[in-house]
Structure formats: structure tokens, C-alpha cells
Image: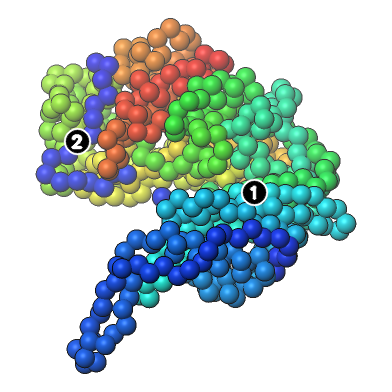
Amino acid sequence: MRREVKYGLIGGSVALVAGVVGGFTLFGGSDDDKSPQQVTSADAKSGGNAPSVKTGPLSAKEVQATSQDFLNAWQSGDAAKAAALTDSPDAARSALETFSKQAKFSKVTVTPGTPTGDKVPYTVTTQIDYNGTKSPYSYPASATVHRDKSTGKPQITWQPAVLHPGLAKGDELRTGEAEAPPIKAVDRNGVELTPEAHPTLAGILDSLREKYGAKTGGKPGVELFIHRAKTAKPAEQQADKTLKVLSKGTPGTLKTTLDAKLQTAAEKAIKGKKSASAAAVKPSTGEILALANSPAKGFSMATQGSLAPGSTMKIVTSAMFLDKGLTSPGKKHPCPKYFTVGGWKFQNDGKSEIKDGTFAQSFAASCNNAFISLAPKLKDDDLTNEARDVFGIGLNWQTGIPTFDGAVPVQSDAQMAASLIGQGGVRMNPLNVATFAATVHAGSFHQPYIVAPSLDNRTFAKAARGLKPSTQSGLKSLMKLTATSGTAAEAMAGVGGDIGAKTGSAEVDNQKKPNAWFTAYRDDLAAAAVVPASGHGGANAGPVVRSILTAG
């Protein structure tokens, strides 16, 4: 029984689961286009004399003329005129008026490329001039032109990226003394961790510099950097990004809990995958040993992601069942072909079933209705409480970097039943799911962390209680059976030591293939991975986790 059983519903759908100065290169002619596509809006009271409003796709001449006027006004320092050519005049004018002053730009030249449809590319070449230090800087950008529905006139679609492709809403381009000194980040053994050697750590290293640079004894240099807007949710906060160093600062050394060997293994395991992420932790302490994301640069799905974890959630669900005495590994526990909760009829993949099996067999085969069938015996908040009080989910972790710490909302009826198998409103990332396996191995939750708390006197999150000894031993037996003869057996084949694993396949609306999940432990090392839209967990995420476990 090595087949991940698909989540299914019959009769409905439970919600399953984002002034510059200087030279300027102009476009060609700017004659107004005489497009034949016009409509007349007739007003009965005015006798049908309403003005004609042009509709339909923009012509090449319209795109050319509008973008030329906008870029010409921008480079000449006429922020008001440039802003008036956009669909957000107030926001555009404010940004245009402060852009060059904050970035210390002068002698700007904008060289347009060849428009493609409604998109106009251009290259901005400038000189940064800060306190007598001058340095050239160039970057590509683009703008999109669209037709205003009410007037029919072409206008620039305003967004901060029009000024610089790295800017998002609220961000600012600044030149000056860096807000934090550079850091020399090292792993647990003193090996330096650089974005060149570990591209997938680039964003995490930026976050560590921003938070701890001033505590490492370094001195800031002068840089052109993107100052990120503050977010309402700390888990979503992105670190400032250095674009160009004008004068180097003096780095201070920051020791992390990462393991360069495991980090390399994790990065190699996800390399080439369109989208994937992985995390590894030390169960006995909570130390984060590896974090990897593909694509390498940008958002860290491993620590800030929020996805339905699929059947990996059955670790938490099973802990709750065992704590409540609702079942045990060796107890007869059939997995029916169908089961109805809250008016919704759940069905296993391929209408499969396990008629006379034990709970251990259903866990190892990941048979959904073995779990759904116990929903009527639960309170709406039972799973939420188990996840928080035993596995530390949602307790505001203080890891040292921005993290999303998981969510198991209180739900009822069919949604609550779906939560038992990691669907419904449950949301996790690989770091969260790695702690599932880590908690089972250690017997209690240890909050993950990447920098020692002594550096900033932060307080770790603590779960209300550990696993009952009988629950821990039961879970370990379930996960070992899964690793040796269940859905995780192929990925874990030949892996020795004290092992346990769980697969997951989380379905997502309007996505052909489910997100593949896998989590496992081997002695004092636990890891988890997700490979979105790839299929079953054992075949797609399993090899990623195996690579990390065997490297350790």
C-alpha cells in the first residue's frame, strides 16, 4: 500500500486551499493615431450628441506617442506632466518628485527599446552622486500602456516598477549610508555562507544583515539600495536589497545554526525544479540546518510560504486521535470508500478502501476516509488545539528571520473534516512541516531558530505540553511503517537509523496536479519539502528530503 490516496469530494467542492536632468533618447514620430475603431454613446436627452470614445486595442502609434510623452516629461523633471499621462496621477507625481533626490541620480539617459504590443522597454543610464562620490549605474525597466475605458485615451499603467523594476508599492530607492553593516555569515562550523556559493540563501542573508548587522561589530558602507515598505504582517516582511556598493563597509561575523553541507545538499536536490522548497531542523534543539528555495532569489517559500500541507497533516491529526484514545496503531480501523460529513460525501482516490485493516495500515497507505470518519467524534477546535498546544503551530516563532508559523483555523462540518487531511483552511510551509517530524522524534516541540537568542534576548515560543509517551511511541511506529512499507517506502529505501516519514499530496483549485509534500526524520535530523503542482509526495518531494537526510 504505497499509494497516496487522493482527496475527493462528491456533490460539491470544499475550498481547498497571490527632477532628473541630462540626455534622453526619444522614440520616433508622435503623430496621433487615427484608429477607425470608435463607438458613439447616444444620450436620449441630448439627442445623441455624446462625444465618441475610442475603444479596442491600442495601435503601435498610440503606444509609441504616449510612452514618448511620458518618458520625455519624466526626464525633463516635469513630474506633473508625466503623472498626468498615467492612470494614478497622485501616486505617480509623488514618486516622480522624490525618486532622483532619494537615489542621488543625475545625468540620466533613457534609451527606449522596441515595443512589444503594449509594453515599452527602456534602459536607464545615470550617475550616482553622493557627497562627492560618483559612480555610474544602469538598469533596464519597462512601462505598459493601456486605453482608459471612460475617455478612450492611451495612458501609462502606473506602478513603482516603472521607475525601477525592483520597486514594489511603498518601496523607495535610496543612496546613502547603509541601514545595517554588512555581515560575514558563517554556519555552525564556521564555514562562510555567501549568496554566490548559496544563491538560495540570498534573501535570508539579507534579512539576517538587516536584523543583526548592527549587533556584529561591523561598520556600514555607502550603497544604493531598495528600502522596503513595512508590512502589517512580519512574516511577509522583505529585507532591504543592495543594488550597488559605492564604498565598502566593514563586515561583522554572524554565526548561524545552518550546516553548509546540508545546505548544499538541499540546494542540489531542488535545483532544476520550477518551484520547490525544503527545510531541515535538528529535533532535539530546533536549530535550523538548511533552507532552500527554487527559484533561488525572491520569496522564501520554505519559511514564509502558506500552502495546504495535504496528508503530512495526518501526523498532527493522528497525535490528536491517539491523545483522545479514539484509535491506536494496531486497532481495527477501516477506511471506507465513502464517508459523509456536513452533507458532503468524501471519496478515496479511485474509490479505493481498506475494509478490515488497522489504523497503522490506513496511515501508511494514507487512506483519507480513515481520518475523515472520526470527524463526528471531534469538537470544532480539537485539531487547532492539538496543533498549537503540542506542535507549536501559530505561536509567533522568534526564529531570527521572518517566518509564517502555520495556521489551523477552527472550522466546522465538511471544512473541519477536510482539515484532518491537511486541506480546508490549514496552511503550512516546509519549516512548519519539518517540525511535525521533529516533534515526533524529540517528543516535544522545539521552536526552530537560525540565530542564537542570546544575540538579541528574544524569547522562544513554547508549546503547552509535549507528546504523551504512548502517543509518541505510537506516532513513531506509524511513521516507521510508512517509511518502510507505506507511501514513503520508495523514497526512504536504504536509509538507515531511527527513521520515520509521511507523504502528502495537497489538491489546489484550478491546478491539474496536486502539490507534493514529504517529511521525514533520521536520528536527530528532520526535513520537509514541497514541490508544487508535481503530483504525489513520495515520488516528487520524497527524493528532496532523502538527499538531505543522507547528506547528514
Residue 543 screen position, x and y as percent: 43, 18
Q: Residues within 10 Å of mark 1 (few under 14, many from 20)?
A: few
Q: Which residue is drawn at 55% across and 71% down?
A: 83
Q: Mark 2 points at which residue?
A: 8
Horizontal placement of 207 versus 370: left or right? right
Residue that mark 1 sits on: 139
Furthest-right residue in view?
A: 132
Query: What amino acid type should be assigned to the residue bearing mark 1?
Result: Tyr
Residue 306 x %, y %: 43, 43
Instruction: Mark 1 or mark 2: name the one nearer the start of the chain.
Output: 2
Q: Is residue 317 visible?
A: no
How many discs appear?
A: 2
Residue at (19, 21) in percent of width and height: 332
Q: Residue at x 58, y 74 (%)?
A: 81
Left or right of 464 on screen, residue 385: left
Residue type, label 2 = Gly
Can you say which quadrant of the picture contains the N terminus?
A: top left
As displayed, is residue 165 above or below residue 399?
below
Q: Nearer the viewer, mark 1 or mark 2?
A: 1
Q: Which residue is drawn at 80% across and 50% down?
A: 135
| Structural crowding at the residue carrying mark 2, measured as other residues with C-alpha within 10 Å and reported as few (<14), some (14–19) or many (≥20) | many
Comparing 466 with 476, the one in front is 476
Q: In this view, does 148 lie to the left or right of 27?
A: left
- Between 258 and 300, which is closer to the camera in this rendering? 300
| 362 to 423, vertically: above or below | above
Does 289 sit above or below residue 416?
above
The answer for how far apart the CA atoms under marks 1 and 2 are is 49 Å
State the image coordinates of residue 124 (x, y, percent, origin top left): 65, 53
Dot 1 falls on a residue whose secondary structure is strand
Could you tell me residue 460's position as x and y percent? 59, 42
